[in-house]
Amino acid sequence: MKNNDADKTAGEQQRKVIGKPFKKGESGNPEGRPKGKGLSITALVKAELDKIPEGGETTNAAQIVQKILDKAIADGDSKMIEKIWAYIDGTPKDSVEISIYDPDKAIEDLEKQFE
């Protein structure tokens, strides 16, 4: 009997540790993530876009924009033109007309066709 109680207590303790190692309201990392650690790829790319490459006159971002425009204008790339247009004006909104079926109106319309 005594041994069975000890196993039960050990099992309960193990479940508590696996499922919820911290007490309610207690954080496992009270200081949070350190500042500047774990920069996102997006942040790193944005930083590179703002740089002016060695021997260059404009930022990397400006150079990319110019290449996009050259592809659209000089090469006449219709897909690039569509993409630029979509970024500037947004994609066109589709509209759908919805009507509710009215059997009485449908009968009236049919009668008018056969008059």
Image (cartoon, rainbow, N blue to C red):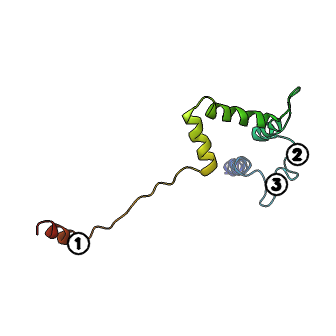
Residue 66, given in percent of the width and then of the height, sits at 72, 34
The reply, left or right, for residue 33 in relation to residue 72 is: right
Disc 3 vs disc 2: which is toward the camera? Answer: 2
For label 1, the residue is 105
Tell me which numbered mark, 2 or 1, is placed earlier along the sequence: 2
The reply, left or right, for residue 76 in relation to residue 108 is: right
Disc 1 vs disc 3: which is toward the camera? Answer: 1
Report the quarter where the C terminus lies.
bottom left
Report the amino acid beneath label 2: Pro
Quick one: label 1, few (<14), some, or many (20+) residues within 10 Å?
few
The residue positioned 82% from the left and 50% from the top of the image is 28
Looking at this rendering, what residue extends furthest in the front direction? 74
Q: Is residue 22 above or below residue 40?
A: below
* Separation of marks 1 and 3 at Cα, in angstroms: 66 Å
Residue 4, given in percent of the width and then of the height, sits at 66, 49
Report the amino acid beneath label 1: Lys
Residue 108, given in percent of the width and then of the height, sits at 18, 72
Tell me which numbered mark, 3 or 2, is placed earlier along the sequence: 3
The reply, left or right, for residue 114 in relation to residue 82 is: left
For label 3, the residue is 27
Looking at this rendering, what residue extends furthest in the left direction? 115
- Res. 94 mark: none
For label 2, the residue is 34
In the foreground, 108 or 71: 71
Tell me which numbered mark, 1 or 3, is placed earlier along the sequence: 3
